[in-house]
Amino acid sequence: MAEDIKVLLVEDHTMIRMGTALVIEKTQGISLIGEAEDGMLGVEKTKELKPDVVLMDIGLPVIDGIEATRQIKEADLGCKILIFTSRDNDDDVFAALAAGADGYIMKGATPEQLTSAIVAVNEGTAWLDPAIARLVLSNVQRQKSDTAATDAVASYKSTKNTFGLTERELEVLALIVDGLSNPEIAEKLFITRATAKAHVHSILQKLYVNDRTQAAVTAMREGLV
């Protein structure tokens, strides 16, 4: 029998912390092992309790959730960090991801979405709230249009490809990041729709993700495109 996913909740608002704790405690397969009301305490409790997943707010006292995330990741404690916040501006999103956050979910999410996100990041899947995923992909697309690829960048990407993707799959992945559908990918690469679909399926398996959005986010975070 699999062990429960151990979660540490770091949240300074008492009512939100109580409500979130209740959701976690009622979910089979997930256990709440501790709570913290500021970022520094969150770091200390992570080191002490060794949770599988830290559910981390951003707007915390003492140190904010982004700095707490950075410190936890630098300590190499092996846990995943899921940002749980009401902030959806560019600066906070990209600062959190740069600090090493494994997922980003808004506080307006349903209990089912929250628990799904906890399970996903625990399994190693980069999970982003749909609104945040659109923001990330929009930023990636903007960067791609502003900056031409160079041989140095191509070389860097090849060193980041630890997923065993073929050259063709990397081409398909780049088009997924650009938001193209399977038929559009097929037309762009002069392949059949069935072949395009097969490539996409293979990419999802190799990246250990469930859908195209997660594949695109993983590609961006890992420097594959």
Image: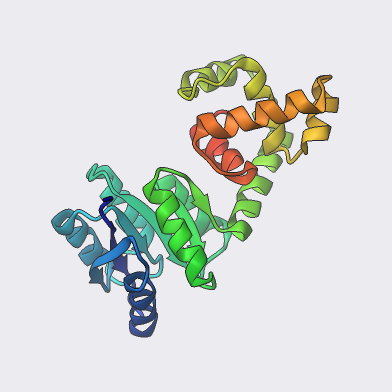
Q: In which quarter of the image is residue 219?
A: top right
User: What is the x, y in percent for residue 139?
Assistant: 65, 46
Q: In which quarter of the image is residue 59?
A: bottom left
Residue reaching furthest to the left = 48
Identity of the residue drawn at 66% across and 31% down: 200
- Count of labels in the image: 0
Do we see residue 144 in this rendering?
yes
Which image quarter is the C terminus in? top right
Do we see residue 223 in this rendering?
no
Q: Is residue 55 above or below residue 182?
A: below
User: What is the x, y in percent for residue 133?
Assistant: 60, 52
User: What is the x, y in percent for residue 185?
Assistant: 78, 30
User: What is the x, y in percent for residue 110?
Assistant: 53, 71
Identity of the residue drawn at 27% across and 74% down: 37
Identity of the residue drawn at 66% across and 53% down: 134
Identity of the residue drawn at 25% across and 70% down: 36
